Image (tube, rainbow, N blue to C red):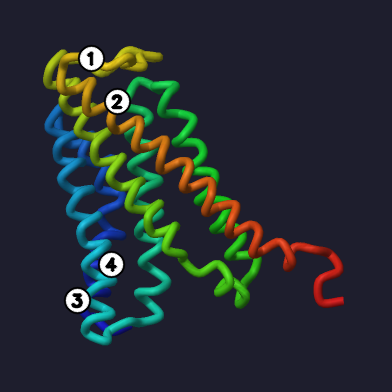
Amino acid sequence: MRWTLPNLLTVLRLAAAPLVPLMFFFLSRPFADFAALALFMIAAITDWFDGYLARAWGQESRFGAAMDPIADKAMVIIAVVVITGYSGMNPWLILPATVILFREVFVSGLREFLGDKARLLQVTKLAKWKTTAQMVAIAVLFLGTGLNYYETGRPPLVGETSLPWSDDWSDLATQVGLILIWIAAVLTAITGWDYFAKARPFLRDDHGA
């Protein structure tokens, strides 16, 4: 592996993923929420820069191609788990979170099964929009949990949905985040089905016979 700037940014983003829950271990709330938000936003920004710089500088590599989607998935999955737990297991969040987690595991399994044919499941433009939607939604939800703890001094009660629209900033951020995470979940499901459709011919028992 060449230690180019794009590869370094990818490695740093991968290393940042487990740091998100550690914010809640070492820091008190709401500082942990805002620190996790800042870390997640920095990682999301580097996600755009490493790919752009690699193409602009002719530094694309097999290492970057392999690690970039892994770093994205690690950031999203870990952040979704953390937010779901610290949002009081909000039922409006659990369903889209489940769709996102299931799709990421499912597609990763397909790629592993296909082996050298996994190039058929190359990242599409819609999948890139899906990742962007996920990261924006997660950032807004982190903002909502932090503001809620700042305003009330407590985490949300189990089952709180914060609907309909409310007057305080934490509810506003949470509601916008929930809308965005549902949009991200729909895009996630569509891209997951697209990858499954491309892989179906290779899942038949008579394939290659």
Q: Which residue is mark 3?
A: 5
Q: Residue at x 46, y 64 (%)?
A: 124
Q: Residues within 10 Å of mark 3 (few under 14, many from 20)?
A: some
Q: Which residue is mark 4?
A: 10
Identity of the amino acid at label 2? Gln
Pointers 2 and 1 in contact (C-beta within 8 Å): yes
Q: CA distance from mark 1 to mark 3?
A: 44 Å
Element type at mark 4: helix
If you read the primary sequence from the N terminus, does the residue marked by circle 2 or circle 1 appear first? 1
Q: Which residue is mark 2?
A: 175
Q: Quadrant of residue 114?
A: bottom right
If you read the primary sequence from the N terminus, does the residue marked by circle 2 or circle 3 appear first? 3
Element type at mark 3: helix
Q: Position of residue 177 (x, y in %)?
A: 30, 33
Identity of the amino acid at label 4? Thr
Q: Residue at x 66, y 59 (%)?
A: 197
Q: Quadrant of the C terminus?
A: bottom right
Q: CA distance from mark 3 to mark 4?
A: 9 Å
Identity of the amino acid at label 3? Leu
Q: Which mark is residue 166?
A: 1
Q: Residue at x 20, y 39 (%)?
A: 23
